[in-house]
Image: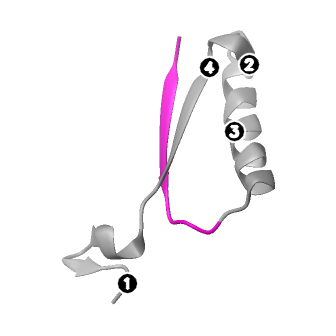
Amino acid sequence: MPTVIVNMWPGRDDDAKRRIVEGITKVFENEKVPRDAVEILLFEVPKNHWASGGKLHSD
């Protein structure tokens, strides 16, 4: 069973999260993985806890 971990910034509403998980699930269905076998974890990471290139995204 595939498990997908999505790290994203906070702020998306539940409808947006539903669209995200539905889209990810469809990718696996296209590869003949049963939708019930797909697990997705959504983590909302604050911008001050996420950095790229040596800089916080909150800066």
Gap in Å between the C-alphas at discs 3 and 4?
A: 10 Å
Q: Nearer the viewer, residue 1 or 45?
A: 45
Q: Residue at x 71, y 9 (%)?
A: 34
Magenta range is 1-11
* Residue picked out by circle 1: 58
Q: Nearer the viewer, residue 26 or 11?
A: 11
Q: Is residue 6 left or right of residue 17?
A: left
- First along the sequence among labels 2 and 4: 2
Q: Amino acid at mark 2?
A: Glu
Gap in Å between the C-alphas at discs 1 and 3?
A: 26 Å
Q: Amino acid at mark 4?
A: Val
Mark 1 packing: few (<14 Cα in 10 Å), some, or many (20+)? few
Q: Amino acid at mark 1?
A: Ser
Q: Residue at x 42, y 61 (%)?
A: 45
- First along the sequence among labels 3 and 4: 3
Gap in Å between the C-alphas at discs 2 and 3?
A: 12 Å
Counting every numbered tag in the picture gives 4
- First along the sequence among labels 4 and 1: 4
Gap in Å between the C-alphas at discs 4 and 1?
A: 32 Å
